[in-house]
Image (tube, coloured by chain):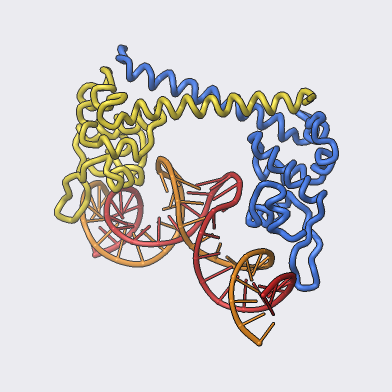
Chain colours: A yellow, B blue, C orange, D red
Amino acid sequence: MRIGDAAAAAGTTPRALRFYEQRGLLPPPIRTASGQREYTPHDVARVRTVRDLLSLGLTVEDLARVADRLDALVDDSTRCTATAMPAEGGGGVAGARLAALDAEIARLTTLRARLAARLSGGQT
Amino acid sequence: MRIGDAAAAAGTTPRALRFYEQRGLLPPPIRTASGQREYTPHDVARVRTVRDLLSLGLTVEDLARVADRLDALVDDSTRCTATAMPAEGGGGVAGARLAALDAEIARLTTLRARLAARLSGGQT
DNA sequence: CTTGCCTCTGACGCACACGTCAGGGGTTAG
DNA sequence: CTAACCCCTGACGTGTGCGTCAGAGGCAAG
């Protein structure tokens, strides 16, 4: 299938697929004689996996770092993500993201409290 | 005082002061005959107020919208911020920010939970 | 008068995940 | 064959709060 259909099947756009490919999240697909990208159902599954992980707060850079292990998740999508993205051992992008999320949540929570204090009558 | 000293006194940089001025957070200061900006201690206090509010999560755009009421906070900085930025009545930038913060915290908290589930063995 | 720091304006850079446009060519149905 | 839609690459736009550079002029000290 060509890029438009593949993108639709994965719930995204052609532009996103080219972007993922450029950033190394997807392997360069086969090209037709005229240079058009040809995707397989497996490629589509990988795109879905990538989008799933992005929606979990991982960044494109995170995924690029573990791109070589992403296929494991494609064939094993409901199982433990940690297999391909160990928390501490080999780069730990997922663990790092979790920590970053915790830090960000803590920061915003503190901000919320300070702003709320200001609004309700900041004494002292 | 000139911009460098004013910026230092307010704990920031000349670039930031020009930026605030351009965005309407600060009134254009007096200029010397040669065109250099001259700041008063009151101006410095206003800069501090602006930075204080920015650090609370308000955006430059938020502050630009209530710029005409910021001086009230400068002279009354320890009191209720709500006076100049009502929660619902006249634009309610602070209230809107509070809601936005709540929404963002909720979003990140959900993400954190989903990512954690993925890492600890996401069944079903 | 010169040195050296300060100031001026205008414009680009950054991080993030793409959207959108421009200018060209492929592909398929009628 | 032609219309109509798809695809290609490359490059700029989006939102935030400034940092940084470029080129030109001001200001106080020796």
Give the residue at the far top of this rendering. B124
Q: Nearer the viewer, residue B76 or A1?
A: B76
Q: Nearer the viewer, residue A114 or A13?
A: A114
Q: Nearer the viewer, residue A113 or A123?
A: A123
Q: Nearer the viewer, residue B44 or C3?
A: C3
Give the number of marks.
0
Picture quadrant of residue C2: bottom right
Q: Residue at x 81, y 41 (%)?
A: B74
Q: Quadrant of the N terminus of chain B?
A: bottom right
In the image, taking residue D27 as reference, residue A17 lies left or right, namely left
Q: Give the percent coordinates (x, y) of residue A78.
A: 27, 18
Q: Give the percent coordinates (x, y) of residue C10.
A: 61, 68
Q: Quadrant of the C terminus of chain B?
A: top left
Q: Give the percent coordinates (x, y) of residue A45.
A: 25, 30
Q: Residue at x 36, y 37 (%)?
A: A12
Q: Give the percent coordinates (x, y) of residue A117.
A: 72, 24
In the displayed structure, A61 sits above or below B124; it is below
Q: Residue at x 36, y 41 (%)?
A: A13
Q: Residue at x 20, y 24 (%)?
A: A75
In the image, taking residue A3 as reference, residue A34 lies left or right, namely left
In the image, taking residue A114 as reference, residue D1 lies left or right, namely left
In the displayed structure, B107 sits above or below C30; it is above
Picture quadrant of residue B106: top right
Give the residue at the far left of this rendering. A33
